[in-house]
Image (cartoon, helix red, strand yellow):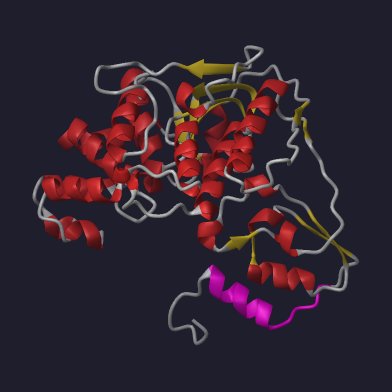
Amino acid sequence: MNSCKIECSHDFYLKKYQLSNPKLDYEYILFDEGQDASSCILDIFMKQAASKVIVGDTHQQIYSWRYAINSLEKANFKNFTLSTSFRFHQDIADLANVILGYKMKLKIIPPETKIEIQGKGNSTQQRSYAIIGRTNIGLLYKAIAFIKREPNKSIYFEGNINSYTYAEDGASLYDIYYLSVGKPQKIKDPVIKKMFGMDELDEYIKATDDIQLSMMRDIVNDYGNDIFSIMSDLKSMHLTDQERKNADVVFSTVHKAKGQEYDTVELIQDFITEDKVNEHKDALDGKVKEKDKKKRPVDIVKINEEINLLYVAITRAKHKLLIPETLVTSDFSPKTSFIEILKIPKTPDVSGKLLSSSEELSQTIKQLKLI
């Protein structure tokens, strides 16, 4: 990269800039979104002679996978707390407080911590409608169900629509399709390419509890050869960036929705749940069932970020939030109509709760997509 033989990445030129020890000729520097700073950017900021201010929300840290650190904790500055939001109503603030309470249950933050977000928003508009998911594939599943039900609606995907066919580990929906039809030469993902068929994929999903692969498999099983025409339909209904404000529905992952706000927000079911939090608490307390002893130990950093992701998604709503019942605590009851709790259809095989295994989650999302 330094000799221009290959294209320079953002990480490369940022590191090169840091090592040059830049001096920024400003009297004041305001560093926003400080909870998602990289060590590199924080180092540049801290070395400046200016009066420095960092603004951020610890509970919105969702980029640890990009080596982000919470500069609010790294910088030894005097703290001032802003606990009031003028975006959403108090009902949504109450739910956000409940979700952040998971951190006290898991002792991520001290149990005696007072979390009291106040909602002073008073929006009555209902022009923008967004469906937000935790994962690309969960959102794609919902979008496919939506266009089957509403073929004349216009849609918009935050970010590149093509990115929604990929799981976080890089596997593509098309990789799973080509595995299902016996065309390994067209598979790009190295892990999927080594598999001999869908039975081996099923075994891999069961062993790894990979939720996103499980959902991709279900999409392939449900739609088969129609996947290509479905993706074509999605793209034909997709508005341009300039037309975004005219979309009937905006689809977005929570990462792409960060910094955005919408009048009405509907969440899909692939976020962390109270059941999962309780399962992690039992594991941390040493209360592990025999069948779960071989599971990987609890990654508290990852769990903290999963809680943050749900919190960020909830707080994108300005007027109304529609949320699956599995994503709220059993004792939460909204006081007004600003929150609508979506009931999950019950079947003999699925309890309706979002459980820990990818198989159960996949079945439940298949039910929820029809709501």
Residue at point 73% right, 50% down? Answer: 56
Q: Could you tell whether 361 is left or right of 219 in the image?
A: right
Residue closer to the observer: 305 or 46: 305
Magenta highlight range:
10-24
| Residue found at x 67% / y 18% | 125
In the figure, 175 relative to 7: above or below? above
| Residue 15 falls inside the magenta stretch | yes
Task: Tell me: 12 left or right of 294.
Answer: right
Query: Which residue sits furthest bottom?
Result: 3
Which one is nearer the viewer's eye here, 256 or 303? 303
Magenta segment main secondary structure: helix
* Residue 185 picture quarter: bottom left
Q: Residue at x 67, y 32 (%)?
A: 97
Residue 269 drawn at (x, y percent): 43, 31
| 332 sits to left or right of 229 | right
Left or right of residue 356: residue 156: right
Residue 344 visible, this angle: yes
Q: Is residue 94 above or below residue 244?
A: above
Residue 104, position as x, y percentages in the image: 63, 41
Q: Indicate yes or no whether the magenta region holds residue 83.
A: no
**The C terminus appears in which quarter of the rendering?**
top left
Where's residue 327, x and y in %?
A: 50, 28
Q: Is residue 323 above or below residue 180?
A: above
